[in-house]
Amino acid sequence: AAADVEVAVLRGWWPLVQDWVSASHTDPAADFGYPVRRATKAVKSNADLLLKWLDPTFAIPKEVQAATQWAQNSSHVFLRTRFTNKWSLPGATFMRYDGLRAKVVPIAPNVTVSISGAAVSLRSSEAEVSNRRYFYVVSFTPFDRIDPTQSAWQLEEQKAQGSMQMSLGARIHEVWVTLQKAAPGLRWGRLTASAPDPEHFGRWAG
């Protein structure tokens, strides 16, 4: 059966598969072309990925400070984080291999966000950029205390704009965080407790 052929290819039973395929040429009811092509594509993709792991810069993901913009009103501070080290660059693409479709497909990143009264942190799942793997992180002590019980975050998908429009309909992921000020009415002079704000933080233009 076609399913047996596909399993045999994935397990590397080449002589057995060759015999089955040879026999299929004399059996009009047997057509193993699709399962063989799909399985060999999956094997090749996994083999190519394994070769990438020989490079330590790929095998050992590096932490990157994610570009973040911020704004405020009298009661809240708003953060917008993109999975890149510079806001003007396109965000990283998060991918996984889809065995059923035998191809790599984009997925939404897994993100962990922690908000306490005196600390905010964010960490993404692994992303591959230019044959290297990265974790995107944000971690800082805010300018003033916040109320974590009234703060929240969400993962947003934005349409790429301008030079980031790599293809028609291209989209990038961002994390939007809303922080409740513990002292409403206090205008923050900067985002972080230490001056000046690190360079990966910028003002949210709108």
Image (spheres, helix red, strand yellow):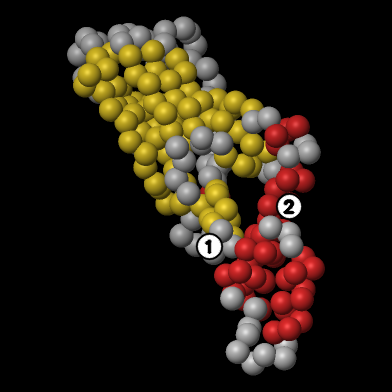
Q: Quadrant of residue 149?
A: top left
Q: Disc 2 on helix, strand or loop?
A: helix
Q: Nearer the viewer, residue 104 or 204?
A: 104
**Residue occupied by mark 1:** 100
* 106 sits to left or right of 79: right
Name the residue rendered at 77%, 46% in the picture.
Answer: 51
Q: How many marks?
A: 2
- Packing grade of label 2 (10 A; few <14, some 14-19, many >=20) is few
Residue for point 42% across, 51% down: 159
Q: Is residue 11 visible?
A: yes
Quick one: SS at disc 1?
loop
In the image: residue 102, left or right of residue 119: right
The residue that label 2 is drawn on is 47
Whole-percent x, y for residue 72 in the image: 30, 23
Residue at the spot x=70%, y=48% of the render? Answer: 49
* Tag shown at residue 133: none
Residue at the image point whose x is 77% and y is 73% from the top: 18
Instruction: Check disc 1: other Cα within 10 Å, few if <14, some if 14-19, many if 20+.
Output: few
Q: Amino acid at mark 1?
A: Leu
Task: Give whichever of discs 1 and 2 has the lower sequence position.
Answer: 2
Q: Is residue 87 visible?
A: no
